[in-house]
Image (cartoon, helix red, strand yellow):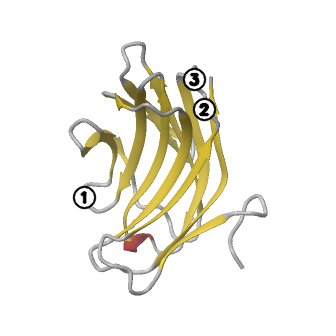
C-alpha cells in the first residue's frame, strides 16, 4: 500500500537498471499567471531509500512578458547536503548556505519554498522551510528570454552514481501565487 496523507499521493520510482545519475521527472503545467510575482511551493514528500538519492529537485517555472523565470531548487544529498539553486544564465547549480539533511526513510517531510520575481527581472529564492524549520536563502538569479506564457511546477528524483533504486511519493502539492 502506498503512503499517503490525502488519500491520493503520487509515486516517482527509479527502478533497478536505472543508469547512474538517472532521473524521474513530474511536471504540471498550469494557466498563465503573467502578473504573479510571489510564489509559495508547498508539498510533502516521502522517500523509501534516502541513501540512494543523489538529489531531490523542486521547481517552479514562469514564462511571462518575454522572459522565463526559473525557480529551480535541489536538495543535494551527495555533495555537501545543501540546497542549491539553478543559475539559468551560467547553466549550473549554485550552493546556498541553507542545509538539506538526508530525509528519514519512510517518513513524510513537509517542504515549503518561497520565491519572488523582482521588478528588475531577476528571481529571488527567499527561504526554504523543512518540517517547520525555516532557513533564509536570499539568492538571486537572472531570467532568460522566452516568448511563451505559462506557469508550471515540477519535481525530479535524481539517482546516485550506482543507480540504486528508490521511490519518492509527493502529496498535498500546492503552489500559491499573487
Mark 1 or 3: in front is: 3
How far is disc 2 from disc 3 in space, using C-alphas? 9 Å
Position of residue 63 measured from the top left corner of the image (x, y, whole percent): 48, 32
Position of residue 51 measured from the top left corner of the image (x, y, whole percent): 38, 72
- Identify the residue under disc 2: 32
Position of residue 72 measured from the top left corner of the image (x, y, whole percent): 41, 43
Q: Which mark is residue 79?
A: 1
Q: Is residue 157 left or right of residue 144?
A: right
Label 2 neighbourhood size at 10 Å, few (<14), some (14-19), many (20+)? some
Q: Earlier in the sequence, mark 1 or mark 3?
A: 3
- Quadrant where the C terminus sits is top right
Quadrant of the rendered image containing residue 18? bottom left
**Name of the residue lying farthest toward the right:** 7
Position of residue 45 measured from the top left corner of the image (x, y, whole percent): 58, 58
Q: Earlier in the sequence, mark 2 or mark 1?
A: 2
How far is disc 2 from disc 1 in space, using C-alphas? 35 Å
Q: Residue at x 71, y 65 (%)?
A: 4
Quadrant of the rendered image containing residue 19? bottom left
- Identify the residue under disc 3: 36
Amino acid at each position: 500500500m502506498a503512503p499517503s496523507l490525502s488519500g491520493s499521493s503520487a509515486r516517482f520510482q527509479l527502478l533497478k537498471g536505472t543508469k547512474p545519475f538517472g532521473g524521474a521527472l513530474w511536471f504540471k503545467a498550469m494557466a498563465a499567471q503573467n502578473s504573479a510575482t510571489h510564489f509559495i511551493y508547498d508539498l510533502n514528500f516521502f522517500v523509501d531509500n534516502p541513501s540512494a538519492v543523489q538529489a531531490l529537485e523542486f521547481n517552479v517555472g514562469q514564462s511571462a512578458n518575454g522572459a522565463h523565470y526559473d525557480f529551480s531548487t535541489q536538495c543535494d544529498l551527495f555533495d555537501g547536503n545543501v540546497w542549491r539553486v539553478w543559475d539559468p544564465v551560467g547553466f549550473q547549480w549554485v550552493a546556498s548556505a541553507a542545509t538539506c539533511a538526508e530525509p528519514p526513510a519512510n517518513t513524510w517531510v513537509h517542504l515549503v519554498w518561497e520565491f519572488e520575481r523582482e521588478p528588475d527581472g531577476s528571481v529571488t529564492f527567499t527561504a526554504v522551510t523543512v518540517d517547520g524549520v525555516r532557513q533564509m536563502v536570499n539568492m538571486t538569479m537572472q531570467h532568460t528570454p522566452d516568448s511563451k506564457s505559462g506557469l508550471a511546477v515540477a519535481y525530479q528524483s535524481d539517482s546516485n552514481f550506482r543507480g540504486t533504486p528508490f521511490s519518492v511519493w509527493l502529496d498535498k502539492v500546492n503552489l500559491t501565487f499573487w
